[in-house]
């Protein structure tokens, strides 16, 4: 039987942002009621909301706008301190801000919580327009393309006819590629980081294991758990899913160097063997699982993870080559030498596909032992080339 090491702090049924919670730096776009939003799956949604944040000012000609696309468990808070409405600092703090690589004194920077997310945009925890109760199990399957279409409506609302650049890592990079394929006339340049043109079988396998962990949590209740009391939501399933993912974000050497074979809580084998005696690496994984549960939603984790598994820019477009031939924007592709989740061959493939299709792509590799998360950690290698690229690309 699993041991709850956090019993003193009951987990909320969901870590989703809800109406009535502090807004923080969020802004909201509510789609017009007479403009239903059509999804890839054939479903039409009404009353869609996109939560977003902005930094800097849009030039009179609208040519200095940069869109940031967040990863799986990210949100619109790309830059800024933790505080009311934002339990953690911005996910790209140190890259976005005055005088930084994405200089908010020069660029008008936008980051939106994706459709299906849980930090202000319409997702499973949002009220269904039919009855005001959370969507829960009624929330439809969404795709990366659906997320981008929602962002396109936000761009219209903000008066951005064409992004100077669209930038993002991991799932954010999937959105970047779809932007350049779906709306090539609206993209001046792109920077896809640690991402892929289509999800591989192994990437889908990791996602499937995490989804199964949530599904088998009896407190998930088929996705309709939002009225549960603290501690009675699917926190264990979501925590396990996050622990699984966390292993794919790092490499063996990093775990070994940091944790070795040390037991947690000062325990020693001399005290006898216990089946539930934890190693330090277990405590690390439990920490990250616990942390996510308090700021994320289990159903959003499932919905977004499914969108990532469905990601394939060649779907319905006669294959990868035909799809990526639509990318004419100057492209900087970044890979990470130690990434086991999205190996560098996938970023090199993106570069090759774009070049073969008549585009102009360059590839840069981040040399880091930190695995997939290096684009959030090794800012000394990410920020300078990103800044140079944004400056070099001609402003329309």
Image: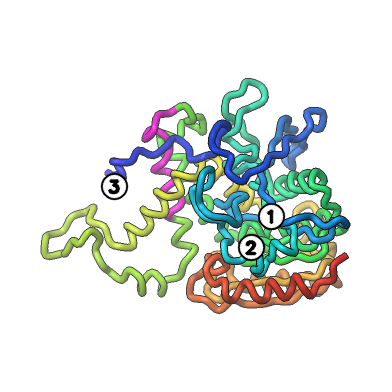
Magenta residue check for 114: no
36 on left or right of 312? right
User: Going from the N terminus, do you reach mark 3 or mark 1 first?
Assistant: 3
Q: Position of residue 365 (x, y in %)?
A: 62, 77
Q: Would you name the residue on which mark 1 appears?
A: 55
In the figure, 274 relative to 350: above or below?
above
Q: Nearer the viewer, residue 41 or 32?
A: 32
Asked if the residue at tag 1 contacts the one at tag 3, i.e. Cβ–Cβ closer than 8 Å, the answer is no
Q: Nearer the viewer, residue 77 or 166?
A: 77
Say which of marks 3 and 1 sits in front.
1
**Residue beneath the point at 74% across and 73% down:** 389
- The disc label shown at residue 5, or none: 3
In the figure, 232 relative to 304: above or below?
above
**Residue beneath the point at 71% across and 30% down:** 47
Asked if the residue at tag 1 contacts the one at tag 2, i.e. Cβ–Cβ closer than 8 Å, the answer is yes
Look at the numbered disc 3 and give the secondary structure of its residue. loop
Query: In the rendered image, which quarter is residue 260 located in?
Result: bottom left
Q: Could you tell me if residue 177 is visible in this image?
A: no
Q: Position of residue 296 (x, y in %)?
A: 50, 44
Q: Would you name the residue on which mark 2 appears?
A: 96
User: Could you classify mark 2 by the number of other residues whose Cα lies within 10 Å: few (under 14), some (14-19), or many (20 or more)?
Assistant: many
- Quadrant that contains the N terminus: top left
Asked if the residue at tag 2 contacts the one at tag 3, i.e. Cβ–Cβ closer than 8 Å, the answer is no
Q: CA distance from mark 3 to mark 1?
A: 40 Å
User: Going from the N terminus, do you reach mark 3 or mark 2 first?
Assistant: 3
């Amino acid at each position: 039987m699993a041991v709850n090491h956090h019993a003193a702090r009951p987990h909320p049924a969901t870590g989703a942002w809800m109406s009535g919670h502090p807004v923080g730096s969020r802004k909201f776009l509510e789609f017009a009621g007479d403009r239903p939003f059509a999804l890839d799956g054939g479903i039409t949604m009404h009353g869609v909301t996109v939560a977003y944040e902005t930094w800097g000012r849009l030039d009179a000609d609208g040519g200095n706008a940069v869109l940031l696309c967040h990863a799986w468990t990210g949100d619109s808070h790309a830059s800024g301190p933790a505080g009311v409405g934002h339990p953690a600092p911005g996910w790209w703090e140190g890259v976005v801000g005055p005088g930084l690589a994405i200089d908010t004194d020069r660029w008008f920077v936008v980051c939106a919580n994706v459709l299906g997310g849980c930090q202000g945009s319409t997702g499973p925890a949002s009220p269904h327009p039919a009855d005001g109760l959370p969507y829960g199990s009624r929330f439809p399957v969404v795709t990366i393309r659906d997320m981008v279409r929602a962002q396109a409506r936000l761009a219209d609302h903000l008066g951005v006819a064409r992004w100077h650049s669209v930038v993002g890592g991991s799932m954010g990079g999937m959105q970047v590629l779809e932007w350049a394929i779906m709306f090539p006339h609206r993209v001046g340049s792109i920077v896809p980081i640690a991402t892929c043109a289509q999800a591989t079988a192994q990437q889908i396998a990791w996602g499937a294991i995490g989804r199964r962990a949530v599904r088998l949590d009896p407190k998930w209740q088929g996705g309709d758990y939002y009225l549960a009391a603290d501690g009675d939501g699917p926190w264990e399933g979501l925590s396990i899913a996050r622990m699984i993912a966390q292993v794919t974000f790092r490499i063996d050497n990093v775990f070994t160097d940091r944790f070795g074979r040390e037991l947690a809580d000062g325990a020693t084998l001399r005290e006898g063997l216990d089946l539930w005696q934890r190693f330090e690496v277990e405590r690390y994984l439990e920490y990250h699982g616990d942390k996510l549960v308090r700021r994320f939603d289990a159903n959003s984790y499932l919905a977004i993870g499914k969108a990532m598994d469905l990601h394939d820019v060649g779907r319905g477009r006669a294959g990868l080559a035909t799809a990526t031939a639509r990318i004419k924007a100057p492209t900087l592709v970044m890979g990470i030498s130690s990434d086991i989740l999205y190996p560098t061959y996938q970023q090199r493939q993106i570069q090759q596909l774009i070049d073969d299709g008549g585009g102009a792509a360059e590839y840069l590799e981040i040399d880091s032992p930190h695995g997939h998360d290096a684009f959030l950690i090794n800012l000394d290698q990410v920020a300078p080339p990103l800044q140079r690229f944004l400056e070099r690309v001609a402003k329309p």
